[in-house]
Amino acid sequence: MSEQAMTPRSTDFSGWYQDVIREAELADYGPVRGTMVIRPYGYAIWEHIQRNLDRRFKETGHVNAYFPLFIPYSFLQKEKEHIEGFSPELALVTVGGGKELEEPLVVRPTSETIINYMFARWVKSYRDLPLLINQWANVVRWEMRTRPFLRTLEFLWQEGHTAHATYEEAEAEARRMIEVYRDFAEGDGAVPVIVGRKSRLETFAGAIHTYTMEAMMGDKRALQAGTSHNLGQNFAKAFDIRYLDEHNELQHVWQTSWGLSTRFVGAIIMVHGDDHGLRLPPRLAPVQVVIVPIWRNEAQRTAVLATVGRVQQLLAEAGIRVEADVRAQHTPGWKFNYWELKGVPVRVEIGPRDVESQTVVLARRDVPGKAGKTTGIPVEGVAERVRELLAEVQTALFEQARAFRDAHIHDVRSYDELRDVVAAGGWARGWWAGSDDDERRIKEETRATIRCFPFDQPEGDGPCLMTGQRAQQVAIFAKAY
C-alpha cells in the first residue's frame, strides 16, 4: 500500500477506479500498450469466479475442453457477418519461424470458427447431440481505448459452445445460460443485473439473438457483464455441421455460444467499492476474514497470538478463508486501513482484554465505524457468528447495489425525457417501436444505446418514446462501458 492518497470516488470515478486497482494490488499495466498483468490478489478473485461458474456449468451438463489459440484467417472469412463484426479488432500473425506464412493466422478474438471446424468432425448423428462444450481461455481483441479489467487487448474468459438438433433446443440453451449467469452475478457477486435481449444493432456478429445481463456501475454507467447467443444455423452452414436425424436425413445443427470474462472483476470493483477501496462479496473474496492482533509488549504479544492462533484454527476448520496479519512492523491502524482497501468482508480484532475475557471484536467492511463493530463474541462461538455475518454482508451488498440501481432507472415517455435522463447519468426505460435508424440517432446524439429489452416486461403496450406508435416492449437506454 503506497502513501499516495486515494482519489475520492464521488469526484473522479475513473481516477478512483484506477487507484483501487493499483492500491489493492489487483493488476498492473503490461509492457505492450493495452495489456494487463493480473496480480495474485486480482487473480484470486478471478479463480473464485471460475470455480463458482465452472460448478454451475458442470451441473447443467457441460464439459470443459481446450481449442487452439491460432485460427486460420480463412475460417473467419467463412462466416461473413462474423468477420465483419471482428475485423477492426483482429490481431494477425504473418510470420512464423522466420518465414512468411502462406496464410495469416488470427489470434483468437473468440472461438466460434475453430470450434465449429471441430464440431463438423465430431457430429455425425442425432445421437451425438446435444454437444455441450465450455472452454476457459484467453482472447485478443485489438482495442484502441483500454481500461484494466473492463477492456484490454488480451483478457481471460470462458466461452461455452453448444450444438443442438432443433432451434427450440438452442433457444432454450441460450436462455438457460443467461439465467445461469444471472444466478452467479446476483448470488455470488452480489451484483444486481437486468437480463434481456439485445437489439438487432447490438446483437453479436453471426447470431440471430443475443441475450445479456446489464449491471449498473457506481457512476451509473451500464456494463454488459455476460452474454449468451443463439447462433441459429449460420455457423453450421458455413462449416457444414450436419447430422443424420432419426429418419436418416441430413440436417444442420442449431448452435449457441456464451461467455463471461475478467471484466466481471471490474464490475465488482465499480458496483461495491467506496472511498476506502474494495468491498468484496464474501463468496468471491480471496480472504473472507482477517484477524488483526493488538499488543503493547512482549507478554501481551505472546498471549494475544495464542488466541489468534485458536481463532484462526476455528475459522479455517469451518471452511472460512481466513488470514492472520501478525506482521510486527505495522501498527493495528495501518493494518485496518490495508485490509479495508483489500475489501476483506470481516475483520477480527483481538487485544489483551479480549484474551482475558476469551472474546473477540468483529468489524464489518460494509458498515463503517462503530456501527459495524460487535464486541464480546466468545472465541469458541466465533466460527458460527462469523459465518452468519458473512451471509449478512453478502445480502447487504446486494440490497444496497439494487437500491442504488433502481433509484436511477427512470421511466420516460419521449425522446426529450430520454435525453434529460441520460444527460443526468441515469438509465432511461420506455416503450420502443423505433427503427434501426432511430436507434442510431439516439446513440449519435446522446451516446446511449439500447442495453436490452428486459425479459421482465410490463403488461399491455404503450406509445413509442420516439415515434408515438404503439409499442409492444420496453427498452432500457444508458451510456455504457
Image (cartoon, grey):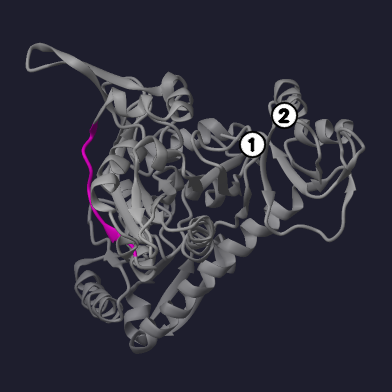
Q: Is residue 36 above or below residue 287?
A: above
Residue 18 seen from this side? yes
Q: Amino acid at mark 2?
A: Asp
Q: Nearer the viewer, residue 238 or 291?
A: 238
Residue located beneath label 1 in the image: 200
Image quadrant in which the C terminus is located: top right
> Whole-percent x and y of residue 324?
27, 65
Left or right of residue 390: residue 476: right
Residue 214: give x, y in percent of width and height. 60, 48
The residue beneath circle 2 is 436
- Image position, residue 86 (x, y; %): 43, 26
Residue at 35% from the left image edge and 72% from the top image edge: 350
Identify the amino acid type marked 1. Answer: Arg
Of the pair 274 and 62, the residue shown nearer to us: 62
- Magenta span covers which residues? 62-70
Q: Are marks 2 and 1 in contact (CB under 8 Å)?
A: yes
> How busy is the neighbourhood of tag 1: few (under 14 within 10 Å), some, or many (20 plus)?
some
Structural distance between the alpha carbons of marks 2 and 1: 8 Å
